[in-house]
Image (spheres, helix red, strand yellow):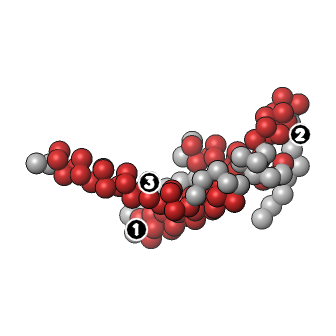
């Protein structure tokens, strides 16, 4: 892991302070999560797939996203914001709903 010293304007620091507890506990964690979210949103973190490694690269990426989402939900559960079981139940409900909608569309 590399470290970098960055200088940010006061307005950015105010936002970082407001995001503490939501995106992380300390300055470094919040800034790291902002950068990762931005790069993910822009598609920069997604590797360019070559034909040969597509399946294994996709699987690795899915496993990474699964770990990130699970970690986020665990953090939210620790803070009393969400219960892990309720999150899993909601996911199952949405998947079932989507499957039934797709089944209806193909009929």
Q: Position of residue 55 (x, y in %)?
A: 40, 68
Label located before the other in sequence (1 or 2): 2
Residue 7's disc number: 2
Q: Which residue is mark 3?
A: 90
**Residue at the spot 64% in from the left edge and 50% down from the top edge:** 81
Q: Is residue 25 left or right of residue 98?
A: right
Residue 12 placement (x, y as % from top left): 81, 33
Label 1 and label 2: CA atoms lie apart by 40 Å
Residue mark closest to the camera, 3 vs 2: 3
Q: CA distance from mark 3 to mark 1?
A: 28 Å
Q: Position of residue 3 (x, y in %)?
A: 84, 57
Q: Residue at x 63, y 61 (%)?
A: 74
Crowdedness near tag 3: few (<14), some (14–19) or many (≥20) residues, C-alpha within 10 Å: few
Above or below, 62 relative to 22: below
Find numbered disc 3 in the image and state the secondary structure of the residue it sits on: helix
Residue 47: numbered disc: none
The 10 Å Cα crowd at callout 1, few under 14, some 14 to 19, many 20 or more, is few
Label 2 CA crowd tier, 10 Å (few <14, some 14–19, many 20+): few
At numbered mark 2, what does the secondary structure look like: helix, strand or loop? Answer: loop
In the image, 74 versus 10, the foreground residue is 74
Question: Mark 2 or mark 3, which is nearer the start of the sequence?
Answer: 2
Quadrant of image for the N terminus: bottom right
Mark 3 touches mark 2? (CB < 8 Å) = no
Q: Secondary structure at mark 1?
A: helix
| Near-viewer residue (18 or 45) | 18
For mark 1, what is the residue? Answer: 55
């Amino acid at each position: 892991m590399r470290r970098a010293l960055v200088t940010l304007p006061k307005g950015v620091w105010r936002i970082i302070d407001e995001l503490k507890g939501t995106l992380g506990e300390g300055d470094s964690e919040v800034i790291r999560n902002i950068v990762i979210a931005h790069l993910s949103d822009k598609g920069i973190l997604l590797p360019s797939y070559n034909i040969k490694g597509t399946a294994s690269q996709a699987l690795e990426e899915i496993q990474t996203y699964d770990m990130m989402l699970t970690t986020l939900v665990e953090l939210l559960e620790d803070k009393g914001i969400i219960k892990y079981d309720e999150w899993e139940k909601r996911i199952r409900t949405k998947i079932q709903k989507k499957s039934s909608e797709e089944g209806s569309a193909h009929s």
